[in-house]
Image (cartoon, coloured by chain):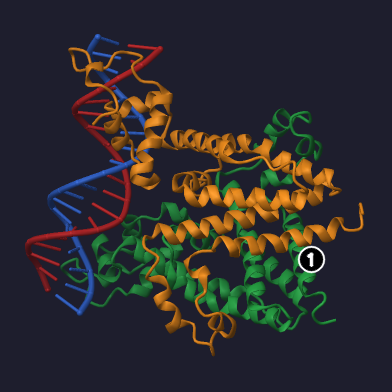
Chain colours: A orange, B green, C red, D blue
DNA sequence: ACCTGAACACCGTTCAAGT
DNA sequence: ACCTGAACACCGTTCAAGT
């Protein structure tokens, strides 16, 4: 049951010094979080699943916040590892594929999503530092394509905030649990007279979260806007 | 100290029936939340500030989650009330002003921001219903301008998610407390060799949260993309 | 230097009781 | 029908102690 062998405790029922490490705690915390979600992760539960005393965790991490910060860094690294490199593509294709990849990864890994987008409740500068290289690479692609640095930054924020928004909405809706019940409300509420557009679209998929194709639709509009900027700059 | 006059308690030190209402609790909760932030709002504290027993709240609200849901609805209503109506403007100007107004309101009211964007941890369909009319109105403006319903929805999501992303980032950074210390890290980390673009921008304001002018920059790019869609449709 | 249990101040919620 | 305190199971964190 416990992650550590009970033989690790000596005759006094106490662990040897050095039998725990910060890395093992992080690893165990990630594993437990995948089972019980981030919100279900508590210090007592973590200690129990590791077979250690609750207070031992505090030797390695000043606070739960600190520990979560480290989990976020680990999640960031995992995310980076899963992202493909599209820098050999022309910039519009690069942007499209890059953010679709991001969307794919994070809508399929709840823990990653929670750590990177929800547990930002305190701004983790640590984790940010791991993202900067990737942001800068994207900006380099745009600057090479003729954008000014300012335009590149504005464009990047437009796409990344939009992407994050879609992912967060998706997670929020699916966090509650089953989504099947949501559209039940639609016909009752979406009277065509009250909501001419929403009512006439019929089954509006965004009620169950933005679908991949809807997400891509917004992305393409933004990229069109970017094209308009550089149109008269280099051919 | 207590929000209710102590004379409201009868000789047995007990409140009269009907001396509390759900509305008063909501009102008191909003007031307390403004003082101690949403995270600081607890059932015991709320009860004390209202001068009632903790358990009395549970007569009116099944759970804290339920209460927060109602606070979110109230916040949504307040937000709607503060939003101006730009529907007499041409659509590009409408979109620009509409989302700038949203940005202004929510970066200046922390409680509103927290309730509408952060405490979505459980998806509040209740609060959503209050927003649908506004969404549909925006969509009507776009459909009238020549967008298909699908294009209108994609465009709207692009802009609203982007706006939310900027507001959330702003709040995250300013939630931690003072921002003065953040740029201190920049020169050390933003080596021009490691980060050619970010490093050369110098003081990158986005480290302290997207500024209003940066926000507007992204907005304009998205609107350019929208213009490209309808360009050849009606003049 | 590292690991620990007991203890503290908090929390949300339930229950069985008052009026 | 409405209001209540006592009690419960949890939480994050501190402290003073063990080895």
As helix, strand or loop, the secondary structure at mark 1 comes to helix
* Left/right of residue A87 with respect to residue B115 in the rendered view: right
Residue placed most toward the observer, B101 or B23: B101
In the rendered image, which residue does mark 1 sit on? B224
From the top left corner, tell me how far across and down residue B69 is, in percent: 40, 66
**Above/below status of B66 relative to B147:** above
* Left/right of residue B98 with respect to residue B22 in the rendered view: right
Visible residue check, residue B174: no
**Above/below status of A54 relative to A190:** above
In the image as oriented, which residue stretches furthest toward the bottom?
A: A193
From the top left corner, tell me how far across and down residue A156 is, in percent: 71, 50
Visible residue check, residue B31: yes
Residue placed most toward the observer, B127 or A181: A181
From the top left corner, tell me how far across and down residue B202 is, in percent: 80, 38
* Left/right of residue B174 with respect to residue B213 in the rendered view: left
Q: Tell me which chain the residue with mark 1 is part of.
A: B
Numbered-mark total: 1
- Residue B212 position by quadrant: bottom right
The residue at 64%/67% (across/down) is B102
**Above/below status of A218 relative to A58:** below
The residue at 68%/67% (across/down) is B99
Quadrant of the image for the C terminus of chain A? bottom right
Residue placed most toward the observer, B108 or A153: A153
The residue at 45%/65% (across/down) is B30
Quadrant of the image for the N terminus of chain A? top left
**Above/below status of A222 relative to A134:** below
């Amino acid at each position: 049951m416990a992650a550590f062998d009970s033989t690790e405790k000596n005759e006094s029922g106490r662990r040897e010094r050095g039998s725990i490490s910060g890395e093992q705690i992080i690893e165990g915390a990630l594993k437990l979080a995948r089972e019980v979600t981030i919100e279900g992760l508590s210090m007592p539960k973590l200690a129990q699943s590791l077979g250690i005393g609750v207070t031992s965790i505090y030797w390695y991490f000043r606070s739960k916040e600190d520990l979560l910060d480290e989990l976020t860094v680990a999640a960031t690294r995992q995310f980076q590892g899963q992202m493909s490199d599209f820098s050999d593509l022309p910039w519009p294709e690069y942007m499209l594929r890059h953010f679709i990849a991001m969307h794919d990864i994070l809508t399929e890994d709840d823990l990653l999503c929670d750590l990177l987008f929800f547990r930002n409740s305190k701004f983790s500068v640590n984790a940010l530092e791991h993202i900067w290289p990737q942001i800068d690479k994207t900006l380099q692609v745009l600057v090479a394509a003729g954008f000014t640095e300012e335009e590149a930054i504005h464009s990047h924020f437009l796409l990344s905030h939009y992407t994050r928004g879609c992912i967060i909405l998706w997670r929020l809706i699916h966090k509650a649990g089953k989504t099947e019940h949501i559209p039940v409300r639609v016909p009752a509420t979406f009277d065509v007279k009250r909501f001419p557009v929403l009512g006439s679209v019929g089954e509006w998929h965004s009620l169950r979260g933005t679908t991949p194709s809807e997400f891509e639709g917004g992305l393409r509009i933004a990229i069109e806007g970017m094209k308009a900027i550089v149109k008269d700059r280099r051919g």
